[in-house]
Image (cartoon, grey):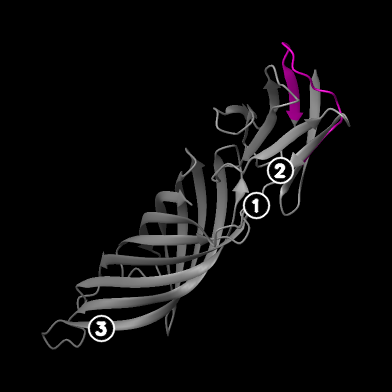
Amino acid sequence: MVLNVRTATCTALLLLLSTLSVFASSSPVRIMIKPASEQVAAIRYQTGTKAKGSWKEVDGDQPILSLEAFDSAQEVLFVQQKEPGRDWSRSYEYRYDTKTNSWDVTLPDPRKPLFIDSMELKPYALFPTSSSSTLYSSVIGGALKLNLSVDEQKPLYGYVEGAYSRGPSKSDWVDVMQAVNISAGFGYRIRLGKLVELAPELGYGLVLHLLEGDLDQDGTDSLEVFVDQQVRVAINFNYTFCDVHEFFVAPIGVLLFEKSRIAALYGVQAGMRFNF
């Protein structure tokens, strides 16, 4: 027999089961679940008195649970759902009341989302457009990025990022161009498949340029420092290959607002995301 299960979301996930008697028998009890959202990629479940056994996993597109010899008088049905890049939800416990011929569900306390949702480590390469090609020939850098979330179920997130970059200069009086930058912004996750996600990002920050060379043209190298504002745009393509790790690659563009002009650079970044 098949038992339809519908879901609704509020502050916690709630599953509503129709009233249908379930008895221990040799024939399996089949339950169909409607996932809490279109982003749910998998559902896992187990039965017993405690959720200490092995989980059985089903695809989010065909969420049919098969309960072998389920004893409604003593056993409990435990259900968890999962979205790409997220950990499994907490267990929801379902008990069948033989007196009322209905299911009762026990919801766990809502999990408070972590403020820091994930961390990224990434190298990147930038190349100047014609407006800034007289200063830079190329830029190689690395960054540490923290993604911030107030609700793990929502696709909008914030981030802060710190980076260091270095590149050769085209100016005769500058030997090395270095920069330390920090930026903050927002991103929006768009699911393209079970494991693939698109996330455009827009950020604003400051760049501290460190120029080493003979800027005064007096024959002595020195270090000069100046600050620019920057706007960064990226389109991340994320691939989830386990619960904790994601690989991503993204085209990026950077605008540097200098006193007399706007310098533009474009390039690519790639790296690993570690989900908390």
Q: What stretch is highlighted in magenta?
A: 15-32
> To which residue does mark 3 refer?
224
Tag of residue 239: none
Q: Is residue 234 left or right of residue 165?
A: right
The answer to whether residue 227 is magenta is no
At 60% from the left and 38% from the top, the residue drawn is 193
Amino acid type for the residue under numbered disc 1: Gln
**Is residue 255 placed above or below 157 in the rendered structure?**
below
> To which residue does mark 2 refer?
37
Label pair 2/1, CB-CB below 8 angstroms: yes
Mark 3 and mark 1 lie on one chain; the one further toward the N terminus is 1
Q: How crowded is mark 2: few (under 14 residues within 10 Å), some or many (20 or more)?
A: some
User: Which quadrant of the figure has residue 138?
Assistant: bottom left
Between residues 99 and 248, which one lies in front from this camera angle?
A: 99
Between residues 120 and 228, which one lies in front from this camera angle?
A: 120
Q: Is residue 57 left or right of residue 218?
A: right
In the image as oriented, which residue stretches furthest toward the right? 100
Report helix, strand or loop for mark 1: loop
Q: Is residue 262 visible?
A: no
In the image as oriented, which residue stretches furthest toward the left? 219
> To which residue does mark 1 refer?
153
Q: How far apart are labels 2 and 1 at the CA level?
A: 9 Å
Q: How crowded is mark 3: few (under 14 residues within 10 Å), some or many (20 or more)?
A: some
How many badges with numbers are in the image? Answer: 3
